[in-house]
Image (tube, grey):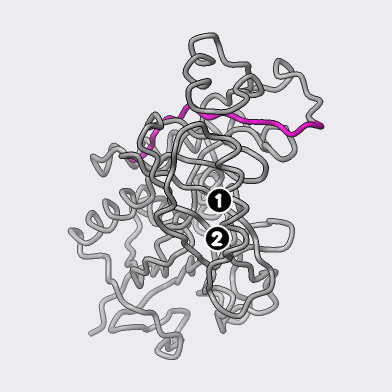
Amino acid sequence: MKHEIEFLIIGQGIGGILIAFELWKMGKSFLVIDDGSEKAASLAAGAILNPVNLNKWHLFEDQKTNWNISLKTYHELEFLLKERFLIPLKFYFFPENDFKKIPEEIPFVSKPDQKDINMVSEIFNNPGDALEISDVYRVDIHRLKSAWKKFLSQKGIYIQTDFHFSDCAFKNNSVEYGGYIFQKIIFAEGARGIANPYFHDLPFIRNLGNVLHLKIENMPREIGFHSDKEKLIPMGEGRFWFGSNYEWSFNELLPDIRWQNECFDILKRRLKIPFQITEHFVAERPTTIGQKPIMIQSKEHPELYMFNGLGTRGFTVAPVLAKEFYGKYFGNKQVE
């Protein structure tokens, strides 16, 4: 007799993790399948929680509520997993020449105090231009994924393997797969969702992102900045993430050397201290038209769902969207 489980989750990027966490909190039975790829887009992301949209200079929609939900959710995960992966940052912004806003008019934005200016002046050229963004955090996604995988594995509800669509058998409002019977399957497989045969005409736009990994020996460990269109984010132990760009036309996942050279020039112009590029990382993103998340149920197979396309603010908004997704399809849980 096949074992019956309520949910199967495909993928453990940030979306898959947070959906699984919602199911765990609600006492639902589930199994997670993930291929464990080190090329996943979530692992290439800067994984930053930033309350301010630096491109448009406004707070995110429903900022006060959503920000508190996001932080609370990540802290709950830290408590459950007994692991610290939410790292506070001192994050600076260097505006362009046409920047007209007065810092005092923008929540979470201020001019650095004299102590910080003295520190910044040892690191950056033109430090007087810097503005400080408060309440910025980095999610150590590698540590989070590792701790969550270990937690699920100890419970016997994690399998590292590829998922094969052709092995699904639809019977009596359920799906048989891998020797189990599932009531529902949630696909949270990132860029691979573009090729999901059970969901058609999805608003995905294929795009590739380049990221640089740096070594900066004399950089304070929790300082980052946003300059031009790029961000520098500390990753611990003198390692830094710098990126990223969008390439909309590509055939292979190959590094863009021209972009790397442009980034090198940006870093030389901005930093006083020496740095070294240690890796050029490339990954495909699950980007959608208008940056609208995909939170849908299949019409053809109502046992199937997709949670994907969380966008550039994915780490900030994913906890809220996971709650909304659960409440819409599986219960009446309200966002608190």
Look at the image and give the residue range highlighted in magenta: 85-98
Residue 226 vs 310, above or below: the answer is above
Residue at x 70% of width, y 22% of height: 106
How busy is the neighbourhood of tag 1: few (under 14 within 10 Å), some, or many (20 plus)?
many
Quarter the N terminus occupies: bottom left
Q: CA distance from mark 2 to mark 1?
A: 7 Å
Which of 315/88 is in front? Answer: 88
Q: Is residue 163 left or right of residue 102?
A: left
Residue marked by disc 1: 243
Residue 256 counted in the magenta span? no
- Tell me, for residue 195, which label it has, or none: none
Question: Dot 2: what SS?
Answer: strand
Q: Among all residues in the image, which is located at the extreme left?
A: 154
Which of 255/91 is in front? Answer: 255
Mark 2 and mark 1 residues within 8 Å of each other at the beta carbon: yes
Which of 106/336 is in front? Answer: 106
Check disc 1 and give the amino acid type.
Gly
**Mark found first going from the N terminus, 2 or 1:** 2
Residue marked by disc 2: 210
